[in-house]
Image (cartoon, rainbow, N blue to C red):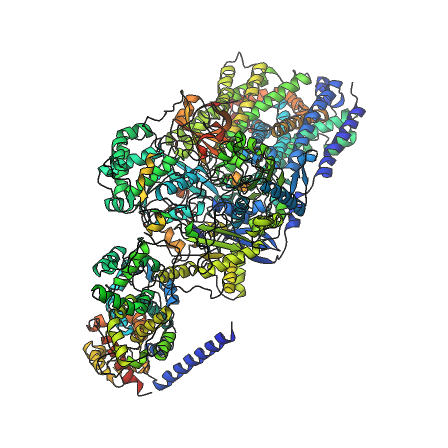
Amino acid sequence: MSHSHNRRMPKPTDPLGPDWALVRPTVESDSRFWIVVACLLAGVSLGVSAYVYQVRTGLGVTGMNRPVYWGMYIINFVFFIGISHAGTLISAILRLAGAEWRRAITRSAEVITVMVIVFGVGNVIFDLGRPDRLLYVLKHGRLQSPLLWDVCSISVYLCCSTIYLYLPLIPDIAILRDQTNKRKWLYRMLALGWQGTERQYERLEKAMGFMMVLVIPVAVSVHTVVSFVFAMTVQPMWHAAIFGPYFVVGAIFSGIAALIIAMAIIRWAYHLEGYLKNIHFDYLGQLLLVMTLLWFYFTFSEYLTTWYGGEPVQLTVWWAKINGEYSGYFWTMVVCCFIVPMAILSRSKTRTVAGTVVVSIFITIGMWLERFIIVIPTIANPRLPIDRGLYHPTWVEWSMLVGCFSFFILLYVLFTRFFPIVSIWEIQEGRMNAKQDMLDRIDAYKVESPEPEADSGALAAALPAGGGGRQ
Amino acid sequence: MARWGMVIDLNRCTACQGCVTACHEENNVPPSNPKLGAQSRSIRWINMMPVYEDEYPHTKMSVLPVMCQQCEHPPCIKVCPVGATFFSESEGIVGQVYSRCIGCRYCTNACPYTVRQFNWFPPDVPETYEQGINPDVSVRYKGVVEKCTFCNHRLMKARDAAAFEGRDLRPGEYVPACVETCPTDAMVFGDLADPDSEVSKLSRSSRASRLLEDLGTEPKVYYLRVGSGK
Amino acid sequence: MLNRRQFLLGLGSGAMLVGFGPVVGCSRDDERIASTLILEPTEAWANSICQLCPSACGLRVRLANGHPVTVTGNPLHPVNRGGLCARGAASLQLYYDPDRLAGPIRKVADAVGGWAPIGWDEGIAEVAVRLKRVIAGGPGRVAVIRGDGQDISSQLLGRLVRSAGSDWIVDSQTPADRAADETLRAMHGTEGRFVYDIANADFLLSIDSGLLESASATMTLHRGFADMRSSGGSFVHAGPRMGVTGSKADEWVPIRPSTVGTLALGIAHMLIKEGYEQTTFLSAKTKGYYDWTDQLGMHHDGVRSWLLREFSPRRVAEVTGVSLEQIIRTAREFGAAQRPLAIGPTEGPASAGLFDAMAVHTLNAVVGSIDVPGGVLLAGSNPLPILDGPVEPPPDAEGTVRADRRTLVERRTVEELATWVLEGRGPTIEVLFVHDADPVFSSTAGDKVAEALAKIPVVVSTSPVVTDTLQAANLVLPGSLWIERHCDASVADEHGRPVVSVSAAAAPRRADTRNIADVVIALAGQIGGGVAERFGWKSYDELVSAQSNALYSSGVGDTFAAAERSEWTQLLERSGWRSPAYDSVTRLEKQLHSTGGWWDSSHAHGEWRRLAPGGDHRIDLAAVRVPARPTLSPATAGSHDRGLLLYVTTEQTLSVRPGGSLPYLQDIASPLAEMGWTNTAELNPETAHHLDIEHGGRVLVSSEHGEVEARAVLSPAIRPDVVALHTGGGRVYGGRYDAGVGSKPLELLSGRLQDSGFALPRDPTLVRVKQTA
Amino acid sequence: MTSKKVAVMVFAMAFVAGAWTVSYAGASQATESEKELALTAEDAKRTTLTGEAERGWSLFRDKGCVSCHAVWGQGGVSGPDLGRTRTLKHTTAGQLAGVMWNHVPRMWERMEEGGMELTPISPEEMSHLFALLLFIRYADEPGDADSGKKVLNEHQCTQCHSVDEPGETVGPDLVEWARYVNPVVWAQKMWTHADAMKAAMDEAGIAWPEFRDSDLNDVVAYVRSRAASGEKEYLEPGSISRGKQVFEVRGCASCHTADDGEEGAPDLERIELPDTLSGIAARLWNHAPRMLEEIRRTGAPAQELQAQEMADVITFLIARRYFFAEGDAEAGGKVFLEKQCVRCHAIGESGGDVGPGFDAIAGNASPVLMAHAMWRFGQEMLGEMAKVGVPWPRFEGNEMADLIAFLNRETRGEK
């Protein structure tokens, strides 16, 4: 990541050339698009009507009962918040690490974050018995409650992510403003007078630098705090210190999977093979493999310690997961999150676009199941044997899940219609400076050089090996 | 600084469930119905909990009436995001503000005793029941959590009466409906802070124990196990 | 294809629909509830008497703005001393029952639902006219089926039937009650009611008693039990299923169903062998126990020899499925106790045979636990005249009719009535009253009863709620609930002391109902003649006044008072002193209403002429040999492949009486079997594993007589060769809370109409259990 | 609150205040204990006779006495059963107070062992308890059916009377009397038949049976066991005032008077009466022939007492002895010295000053006061006495009554 004066930066008025492909979706549309939107809207309205029905009738329309007081909404909440780590966290890490290959994928990741986080929060609201009293959380909020920690960290995360999405979007909006003639008023407003001057770039990079550093701890905190919602109680197999990092790892894991799926669709829908290349999927696949192992490590630790400790209340839940009424979910999760990813990702031959997408789909399902396995068996098997519950989601909950996914995809699709989903200026910038960067790197390797170039050299030395300019 | 507490003598308790219906009648718990029953959503402020030990033919079983244990350190209160459940420092009772509750059910999950109940639907109260509603207790609407309050409204009434007469509350003047109704006098209620009260003497009995004591919640409901001894 | 304009239009209308839908239809149910809350209500308390079971506990009803809102026990009432069981505490739900009858109705073929409203006067006149004609047609044509209620209206209906020259007074007793009755008649030669002085026993042996979960008179037994346990008494429970009773026991002895009598006599055998017989008691107070030689020099075997011959522990072990060692140990513990007491089935049709009741009584006799503290007592009788007696005994000098001169009257059963009607024996029964009972539902042969009812030209029901029996009636004259009328009850407390409760109406009437006692008096008046003569009162109120008079002139007892005052009264009465709280009838009446009633708190043990009035005042133990089976064969063994033994039990929360299935009770039906709102089949997990049945799964239980569906509940507290079902569900007609809830396992039992209902088949029914989809 | 109650309260308060000021003014050196002693003495005097046995019973329960002491088998077993006459010998309130003094240190020990606390008992409450104990005294313990059967056989009653057996007998079948639960009724019935019975018995050559104190009770129990229940006739608890009236109006007093040294009707205040009601009833029966003879001899009008009247008279007699038995002040003086009371307590100028002076008693000493004082100050006193080395006093026979008489004589004069 270089901030040197001698870097060349693209101007919004620079001719786009082949990069026009990145702008095309915002100006052209076909009936295929409207059909997709119509389908998604149908999904959305299914969800909305389910919700309206639920609000009017009561939460009894769900499959929740006594003692299974939390069900699909809380599962979805954790799941969506997990997905949201795709974006900002991954993009920030990659940006921070100066990974050149990030340029094409950061935006699509960040958009996932911002869009999906709304549904994470939304699911908590769906879960409320009294959504009309939502604002009590602000009015009468008690900081002792982990739920309020969630409220705080998620709202901070949403703000940061939105800003973090918006900042690198500004130069691209300016491109749209200057080079297209649609929605000019909107782009003019949003471009904030971006002209691509050096001063502007300097400020932008400063702001982005600040945000990317900020967003990492916030993102980590968000999922840690989400895990705290469970871990702070004394319930068996919830009350575990491992939950914080376990959730963060799981979040990144599912986030990457979601990102891969999103990228694949974008690449296919907008013919962006030139930008979202096989290599991206390969890299992300490798990252996913690492996360698979990490996830397995955490899962293994959690289950082994619980089993070995042998506390009866814990074991009741443990066996319910391993061998009881939830074993189906559990073993499917293991297959989806570990066996399939290992089988496909560990070999470079299968780490193709198709391979990673298949794995990602498995992981997404598996991670949803993991949330289920975390939430349900514990509350279905409380310490005192007053009730033993079983949980089966009803059509309302499934509809809401469909609604959430549809709405999320809809928002994502709409975003791609309004803004370039691949960062144009970053691609251009990388292209303009690729040669210079390579030279800088070569310089950095020169042992005899008495006085390396101050900025680029030091930074290049600090870069991790994988981040280099193989592109 | 009263510490209201209860001792349930399992030697005397016959699991007749008189306490359960008396509680429900007193506290306007809506009647359940076959649908709710099948969904395991009936609201019960007191539950009869069977605990099995050992295998047939040496099976041992005990049946305990379990209501809100009125913990001194209630896990449910910590987690409430809006302060809809609160701990009365002066009385030691865990209360619930129905009009504040947002229905997130965090407390129901945090409670290790699973005694908190949720209104999944609007109360299905036939119109004919309406005149029979106890005016001292509010009827809960759908979407809020409720639980045993040790018949807190009775305490307030008794305190008012005592204050009106310019005296302190007398022992036995305030008892919850379940204790009042218990046909075998298995439930004893009173101030645990008063070392001379019957409940506090019984709570020190060698037969006394509390549910899930190792969690450190310090419940104020004691159970005297079956057997001889004080 | 879709263009943008069309798309936006669709989107807009969709949004409108979604947005306004809820606003239009969403009613704020909070507001409806809020509007029912009244600030600063006026508060009042009134006494009443719970009549949901034969305990007849005293109630304190709390009224807010004149409407009852809560009930609790009357602290002065000696039966419950301020406590209430689940039924009593829920009883307001019957008062506010949304499906209660609004008033009298008559079956009309072309009316909506088959019923049409009718005025009270019209209804009474119709029955009166009919009765008049029937009575003129000859004797034995009027009948009544009554419940186990203890109030005057039941007695008056009996009196009406007797006045009409019929003795068809059928008390729909539980089989256990009937067996106890029969035991008392056969062994003691008297009528009355057994009372178990559990409180003073120090070793209680329950043989399938269902003491804590299925006893119909909850309060007396539970309170005694608690006192017994508190004072350190030991308790052993034998039964196929542990149940709540077993959970409170020091030891649970799993026995096969229907082997109660065998086990009791097996223990008696061991007691004799081990030298625990109370020989003084047995020789002085019983007969038929020892061998005897009659006047002709014939030698007769006594019960003792019979026991020693037939009930060797080895054979008993074989029959009951209890180990030899266990039988011997239990017998030793029982015999070694100071005040041992055995208690047999108190309710539950499962194995409540006559033999069982007699065998348990014999066991108590062997250890001399009859009419001693901590033993079996006989309920004392109150000084009130019996209104439905066959021939009224002449009043004595003071004008009161002594209750004790009750002669043995042939008891009739519902099943007998059904057989009589169906087979067309003797005079046809033309008018039948059904009061406080639901025999179509509660009888083991409900279908036969329904069939018989259909053949009776006029069936008058007094039920205030819809029941299966009501559906078979022609005319319904709904009686007021106790809480909304002047009411009474005559019972005995846990020590057999007579208690007469009286209470004014506690709450306003919610429907156009009347006190049945008043209805009967009006009927008698309209019939005129000899019938009217026997009803010398103008109204129920007047009758109650006459009762108060009788109480006053009896010169015994006192109105209810706090426990300490009652203890004082007892102390006084023991030495022959008495200072009642009243000194005139007027004050007595006032006191009756303010305290809740009258009782005679003194109880004297050892009054043998009362216990065994006939001949030499001895208990005839030889009677036990009559219902015993000639040979002891090992009971049919159940197993998962041959079929399981059916054990039908009763939950006291699920009453079989009309209006007994209140929603609060349905929800908590059994504390063990999680069986709110459904019927459950309790199975041992081992058995369930063999049969591939999961906890909570639906199962079909079938015998050769029928099949019922139930929810499987796996529990380690039941014998593996047994499946337990409970009664109380399976009503066809009823309100929203009971019609169609659960199922009726009685239909599985074999030989349902035989044995006159009280000595149910002792051969257990084998059933198959399988999981359905 | 009724105006009567208010008046009583005002009066009581005025009285207490007055007594307090008087005692305070009279003895400026008076200790707190003395003041209290003076007050309790006043209270005790006022309430002695108004105590009610029933209230005594509720106090007996509420104060926890019942957890150790039983009455006829009802209650705890760690203390003696107060209904068992054979274990507790005392016939007057003074003797009762003495017995209480004697056993109280042991009782405190027991209570301490049991972790029980000493509940305060006011003089008024003490008087109710005394009334209860009086009642228990005269009511007697329930009879024993088997002994009753023996009694009937021994005394050849069964020669003329059957018990629940059909057939003709000389006398009535006793079962007909089964409803009379109270032995007094039996005594009364027998009494009214005495003449006829005497004649019949003389004819049959049967000696007039002499019953022991408990016999009658046992007979009743036996006869009742042969009868059907439900038929019970009771008497109202005897009234002292009614009994006094009957005693005087019906002429009993004309023969049974004090000072009548002649042989014949004994002075009922002097002679040793049985402790129990059935005992007195038996005694009445036993001396029926002699009395009948005496009546015939003196020509006094024959008195037919109703059962209730007889109960009242007997109650009166017992109560009179119970409450009014006066002690001997001279002997009391000796007790005061012998029991070393004088070492701590002063009367007038003489005596120790460890404990409060007795002048405050002002002639109001009574058994109730003594019992109350012992209950109120006893534990403290026990401690002090241990320090000084004085043994806890034991009062035998009438010593307590004597001491009371002495105290009253000594303290009455000054004020």
Q: Is residue A90 visible?
A: yes
Q: Is residue D180 above or below residue C97?
A: below
Q: Where is residue B102? Give x, y as percent.
A: 60, 43
Q: Which image quarter: residue A198?
A: top right
Which corner quadrant holds the N terminus of chain A? top right
User: Residue at the location (39% across, 36% down)?
Assistant: C354
Q: Nearer the viewer, residue C415 or C767?
A: C415
Q: Quadrant of the C terminus of chain A?
A: top right
- Residue A176 location (% of width, % of height): 74, 26
- Which residue of the protein is positioned furthest toward the bottom in this rendering? D414
B189 or D136, which is in the foreground? D136
Residue D38 occupies quadrant: bottom left
- In the rendered structure, the answer to whether residue D324 lies left or right of residue C163 reads left
Judged left or right of residue B174, residue D286 is left
Query: Does residue D213 lie above or below C678 as drawn?
Result: below
* Closer to the camera in the image, C438 or D341: C438
Provide residue A430's location: percent of width, then percent of height. Answer: 63, 22
